[in-house]
Amino acid sequence: MKITGIALKEIAHRKVNFLLSCLSVAVAASVFILANGLLESTSLQTEEIIAQKEIETRNHMASLEDDMRKHMKGLGFNIYIFPEGQDMSEVYDKGFASKTMPEEYVTKLANSSIVMINHLLPTLTQKVTWPEQQRTVILIGIRGEVPMAHRNPMKPLVDPVEQGFIALGYELHNALKLKVGDKIMLLEKEFTVKMCHDERGSKDDITIWMNLTECQELLDKKGRINAILALECNCATIDRLAEIRKELSAILPGTKIIEKGSQALARAEARMSAKQTAAKQIAILKSQRDALRAKRESLAAMLVPFIGIMSLAGICLLTFINTKDRISEVGLFLAIGIKSGAILALFLVRSFIVGLGGGILGVLSSAFIIRVAGGTYFNNYTVQQLMSVELSLVIIIAMPVFACLASWIPSFWASRQDPAEILRND
């Protein structure tokens, strides 16, 4: 009879011992699978929480940065481009340039590949006498912002003034008792008051804003402007102004460029602060995730060897008990000429079958426990999420190998017994 057949007959004869052995293997397999499932469920839940936190943090910081960006845009334009040859001391003294440049310059900028500025606004500014009211005012002609050809359109910082309308500074509309909708003469031309600004405590309070084309006609400067206002969009570089000047000089050689330092600095610091806060929040979450992962790995590193050792010890003990019970059979086999190697193989085949049966039982029982107790102990994760096919196959294959390794010493001991000594005592 073959060794496998003998092993199966022995299993059928000693059912209780076989079932206990299988149960021992199944418990070891189940403990390993369930422990892994608990760790995996905790890992999955933690990853979900951290992922959600990361999304919430990114969204919150993006919203914060966007709000900060919008708030900083309220500071207004911070890059001013003046005509070639303009004496900047005159600009600082009067607040505007006396020289002019072609209006086409702003179109040239818009159609270029410049990346460090946006929100281009051509203006024509001049101090004039308002003869109808016997006042000196600052007249500013503006038009709609010129969109950059290589970018998506952005909401303008300043709304254009339509032809036939004007916007008045606080001192002007307050002193003249004007309100929106009133008609008024300016340089022999009738205009409708479109907007009355609040008090700003600056030269804006004596300023009249009007359509650029009409302003050019009134000042006899058709197609001319004396400044291009822009908003700096790259606030993270070390020498922003030098880079902007270098980029603009290649497109509009000779023009003078200045930056409103306080506003640019406020904008840069606000954006950098928002970005740094967002990066710090994400870094903290990632650090917490890595720490949790390290703890789980440390726990698994202790748990897995412990379960393995306990499994080996249990199988070894049960195999030793089995060999002691069968020592008389071993003596008879050896006495009739069966080799000790065959005896060893007989015990190992039985252990292999025990390991295979216990492994399958452990996998099935683990799947059942996870399905039944998933909501209580496994965070409502499914069997498919916590028990992969690969893991199940590894357990089913590993358990017979472990069982054979665990039973090797008692099996080897039984196969090396002296048949004469055994039969003399039994």
Image: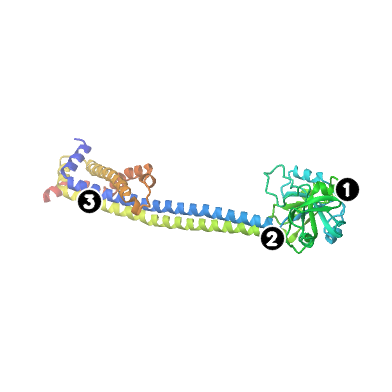
Circle 3 crowding by C-alpha within 10 Å: few under 14, some 14–19, many from 20: many
The residue at 17%/45% (across/down) is: 15
To which residue does mark 3 refer? 318
- Marks 3 and 1: in contact by CB < 8 Å? no
Write down the residue under mark 1. Answer: 220
Of tags 2 and 1, the one toward the viewer is: 1
Determine the CA span between mark 2 and mark 3: 78 Å
Asked if residue 329 can be seen in this view, the reply is yes
Which comes before the other along the chain, label 1 or label 3?
Answer: 1
Camera-near label (1 vs 3) is: 1
> Does 267 sit left or right of 344 as displayed?
right
The image shows residue 83 at horizontal and vertical percentages of: 84, 51
| Residue found at the very far top of the displayed protein | 1
CA gap, disc 1 to disc 3?
Answer: 110 Å
Judged from this view, the residue extending furthest toward the bottom is 201
**Residue under the image location 69 percent in, 60 percent down:** 266
Q: How is the image coloured?
A: rainbow
Residue 78: x %, y % from top left: 74, 56
Q: Tell me which amino acid carries mark 2.
A: Ala
Q: Position of residue 345 (x, y in %)?
A: 25, 42
Q: Residues within 10 Å of mark 1 (few under 14, many from 20)?
A: few
Q: Nearer the viewer, residue 271 or 294?
A: 271
| Residue drawn at point x = 73 percent, y = 54 percent | 180
For the residue marked with disc 1, what is the amino acid?
A: Asp
- Residue occupied by mark 2: 266
Q: Is residue 252 visible?
A: no
Q: Which mark is residue 167?
A: none
Residue 70 found in image quarter = bottom right
Taking depth in this image into account, of 219 and 282 the one nearest to the observer is 219
In which quadrant is the N terminus drawn? top left
